[in-house]
Image (cartoon, helix red, strand yellow):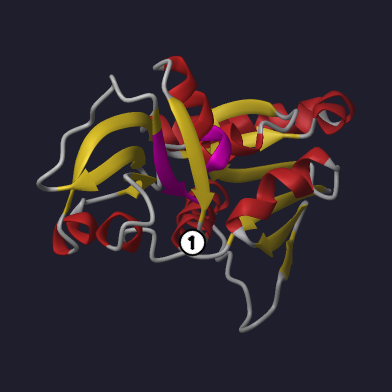
Amino acid sequence: MLTIALPKGRIAEETLDIFETIFGNAFKFESRKLILEMGAFRFLLVRNQDVPTYVAHQAADIGVVGLDVIEEQGLDVVRLLDLGIGRCKVAVGIRNEDELDWSKPQMKVASKMVNITRNYFSKKAMGVEVIKLYGSIELAPLVGLADAIVDIVETGTTMKENGLKVAETIMESSAHLIANKHSFLAKKSEIMDLYTQMEKVVCGA
């Protein structure tokens, strides 16, 4: 049996749709249930940021999670396939009236993605003080908590409605299929068989 960690929400639903396309069965979690067993698969419904942890520690053999989460956490997992769902970007946001000034010695940046933020500004040779926030990140530049934010952007509407604009895109992200390194060796045939079938659906073959 393959154990698969899925993030709660739309990505889980779209991933299960792929399984329905492949196997012709309905893959649905019962209300409030966190485990779904169907045939040779056991699905775990977990918090988005926890998917790589479940996979890295082999509580799940494989998982589906955004590339931004993989990059932020830097855990040692096998990246198998870009599923092309949950598309978004990680971007630097600033107030509409501001411009990014790379000549400044340091910036204060609010974000929940501390590592991505530090790495990006380091590559720009810019000193950065990262203020970690867990929500309402758009508020930070408006009340003087930070000069800029680094956040997930899908349509950009939330930034616009709060008087912010995208100054630079750090990375494009979408949901990826990942695997535990030991599971990938021990269950390689099962994982690769599933990978091949998922790839056909994703690529429209």
Estimate the x, y position of residue 110 in percent, counting from the top left: 43, 49
Whether 195 is among the magenta residues is no
Camera-nearest residue between 70 and 122: 122
Of the 4 image quadrants, the one containing the C terminus is: top left
Camera-nearest residue between 201 and 122: 122
Relative height, residue 169 to residue 146 (above, below): above
Q: Secondary structure at mark 1?
A: helix
Camera-nearest residue between 178 and 106: 106
Range covered by the magenta-colored residues: 107-116
Identify which residue is drawn at 55% across, 51% down.
19
Could you tell whether 99 is left or right of 142 in the image? left
Estimate the x, y position of residue 113 in percent, counting from the top left: 52, 44
Estimate the x, y position of residue 149 in percent, counting from the top left: 36, 46
Identify which residue is drawn at 75% across, 46% down.
53
Relative height, residue 170 to residue 124 (above, below): below
Estimate the x, y position of residue 102 in percent, counting from the top left: 28, 22
Relative height, residue 193 to residue 7 (above, below): above
Q: Which residue is mark 1?
A: 13
> Which quadrant holds residue 65?
top right
Identify which residue is drawn at 78% across, 34% down.
180
Which amino acid type corresponds to the residue marked 1 in the rendered image? Glu
